[in-house]
Image: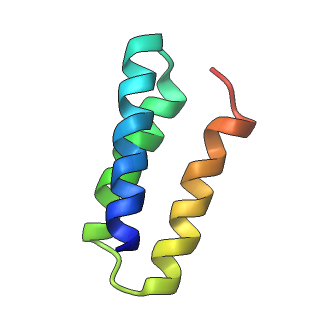
Amino acid sequence: MVNVLFGATGLAYFVYGRRQKMIVPLVCGIGLMGYPYFVSNAVLVVVIGCVLLGIPYFIRY
């Protein structure tokens, strides 16, 4: 269920980054949509997802 949540948020970041022509949300969106396929540990999925969700807040380009 967490994978779906992070995937949907990643899609929103991707669309926002593409429309605003901002690279950080675009890359974080791609990362949020893709990383759950490679990480199987639930705790790591949540930690990595939270880090990727926070990066666009702190880095604005």
Whether residue 7 sits left or right of residue 43 in the image: it is left
Name the quarter where the N terminus is drawn. bottom left
- How many marks the image carries: the answer is 0
The quarter of the picture where residue 4 lies is bottom left
The quarter of the picture where residue 14 lies is top left
The structure residue drawn at horizontal position 40% and vertical position 60%, both measured from the top left corner, is 5
Whether residue 47 sits left or right of residue 23 in the image: it is right
The structure residue drawn at horizontal position 32% and vertical position 52%, both measured from the top left corner, is 33
Whether residue 15 sits left or right of residue 48 in the image: it is left
Residue 31 locus on image (x, y percent): 39, 50
Would you say residue 31 is visible in this rendering?
no
The structure residue drawn at horizontal position 59% and vertical position 61%, both measured from the top left corner, is 50
Whether residue 46 sits left or right of residue 1 in the image: it is right
The structure residue drawn at horizontal position 29% and vertical position 56%, both measured from the top left corner, is 34
The quarter of the picture where residue 36 lies is bottom left
Along the line of sight, the residue nearer the viewer: 15 or 36 = 15
How is colour applied across the structure in the image? Answer: rainbow
Along the line of sight, the residue nearer the viewer: 24 or 17 = 17
Q: In this picture, is 28 found above or below 15?
A: below
Would you say residue 18 is visible in this rendering?
yes
**View extreme (top): residue:** 20
**View extreme (right): residue:** 58
Residue 57 locus on image (x, y percent): 70, 37
Residue 61 locus on image (x, y percent): 62, 20
